[in-house]
Amino acid sequence: MKVYMSADSSSQAIGTREIAEALTASAAQRALELTLVRTGSRGLYWLEPMLEVERDGRREAFGPLTPADVPGVLDALAAGHAHPRALGPVEALPEEQGQQRVNFRRCGVVAPGDWRDYLATGGMLGLRRALELGADGVVAAVTASGLRGRGGAGFPTGVKWRTTRAAAADTKFIVCNADEGDSGTFADRMLMEGDPLSLIEGMVIAGYAVGAAQGFIYLRSEYPLAREVLERAIETAYANGLLGADALGSGARFDVHLRLGAGAYICGEETSLLESLEGKRGTVRYKPPLPAMEGLFGKPTVVNNVITLATVPAILTDGAEAYAALGHGRSRGTLTLQLCGNVRRPGLYELPFGVTLGHVVQTLGGGSASGRPVRAVQVGGPLGAYFPVELFDTPLDYEAFAARGGMLGHGGVVVFDDTVDMLEQARFAMEFCALESCGKCTPCRIGSTRGAELIERMRGGARAQQLTLLEDLCEVMEQGSLCALGGLTPVPVRSAFKHFPEDFQPAAVAAAG
Ligand SMILES: Cc1cc2nc3c(=O)[nH]c(=O)nc-3n(C[C@H](O)[C@H](O)[C@H](O)COP(=O)(O)O)c2cc1C
Ligand code: SF4
């Protein structure tokens, strides 16, 4: 019998290792021949630990399981009986939710980094197509697909690649930003642990398109499993000619190096990341020059997020038009939403842009895990806005979110029920900025500390003067900060205050002035 189980970090944290042990022991007791394939995750974390059993070329899922369930599942399978934990064909589960898997098409399906699995599921078709199109054709296709960077800012990837391609230089670099520092996000880790070869293929295509011979993956050190999987995948890529002297017959050399960060949130900001890659302390650089013109070691450098790069092979395989046909407004393709916090069905949902926030939280997520009413949702990481239920009709689209004072960022959605203290959330935003500030500019370095103190003093009733001061401080941080850490920290603070004023200003106290 052939069975599949996720071995990614999140699934292991929920208990897949224990299920795998129980499965091996139960199979041995029954003298059952068992092939257990460890895959990445399908992102259906509320159903983990989940077991997939291959029968008649299809996989049927069982979950969520405890080790005690395992003998019963094997008995039911042997007898052809139903089991209360049976979930049916696993492919149908994400489809039922309207998911469209472009980035995560292989996650949970293949053994991560297995070359044969990769080829059997369309791996390398993107690079082959790239070589047919030629470098200019690749840049044109990426531009036509409408792909925008998934690291946070949503900058058009084709424009970035065109800039680096046009830059005259003897050396250029591709840098993959795998620092994934946003709270509530795990898409990069899931992709690297579940389908690392697609990232490597994306980097090779990027190198071919802009004329770079070297790529660096800057990975946060808190991801030891992703490191292990990537190291193996890089070896596999060299062994099979995807990397090295003649990357799949392109005639050009491409090498990938893995580098580990040391846990600073600011090292996810692209210029700090480049400083850190150069072996210096991670502080933000002034722009211009843009990294696309003068980046790593002063050379033209494409810095892209993991998901951005890993999307490129799929875009070239399916065609730019197919990708551009998905989505909403100027947000094309799919968004990999990471739904977590106080929610019944946490997980990774890959959806075309355009579905509403309410659909994601209430319909897909099933509301709060506590069963209490949902009160607030923070979208886009620690610098993202808090949305109240009244704004749940906002479509997931970069422009629609910006129009309501928010941002999609890296696609993290963190849910809070009605016990959340929004003053505390606002204070925490300032404290986070104070802790993670690189210290280069005063509004961020000092402003955030003063902001946290000021909000703390508002506990129990804010005075009108304090609220004016907070608004002033937010404006100074927004206008006077060099990068988005200081510049966007006012976003969660202001949104908490705007949408949940009752947590800041008990009427009786505020009236005192
Ligand atoms: C404070 C801060 C932290 C950031 N952290 C990350 C990160 O962890 N991962 C990421 O891909 N981008 C991060 N970014 C965005 C990067 O600066 C950059 O825009 C991105 O890597 C570009 O890739 P993309 O165009 O593919 O999105 C961060 C930006 C800021 C201001
Ligand atoms: S805003 Fe903060 S993190 Fe950004 S450069 Fe200034 S001090 Fe550094």
Image (spheres, rainbow, N blue to C red):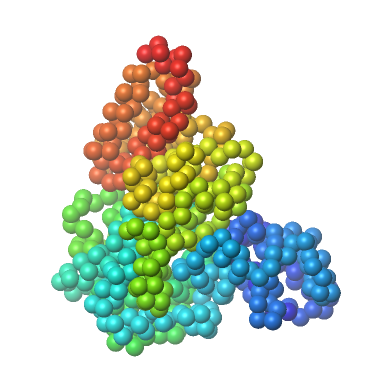
Estimate the x, y position of residue 22 in percent, counting from the top left: 76, 66
Question: What residue is shown at x 29% (from left), y 82% (from top)?
Answer: 133
Spot occupied by residue 459 in the image (x, y as percentages of width and height): 47, 23
Which residue does the image show at 35% across and 23% down from the upper left? 467
**What is the x, y in percent for residue 388?**
47, 38
Figure label count: 0
Residue 475 falls left or right of residue 104:
left
Q: As drawn, is 1 to the left or to the right of 259?
A: right
**Depth order, front residue of 296/379:** 379
Q: Which of the 4 image quarters holds residue 322?
A: bottom left
Pick the front one: 250 or 132: 132
Quadrant, the N terminus: bottom right
Which residue is at the far top? Answer: 512
Q: At x 30% / y 74%, what residue is drawn? A: 141
Residue 87, quarter of the rendered image: bottom right
Q: Which residue is painted at 31% across and 33% down in the image?
A: 474
Above or below residue 3? Residue 466 is above
Q: Can see residue 299?
A: no
Q: Quadrant of the C terminus?
A: top left
Up-down relation of residue 287 to residue 129 (above or below): above
Q: Is there any visible trace of residue 12 in the rendered image?
A: yes
Across and down, in percent, residue 393 comes to 45, 46
Front residue of this view, candidates 255 and 210: 210
Q: Is residue 419 above or below residue 331?
A: above
Judge left or right: residue 376 versus residue 143.
right
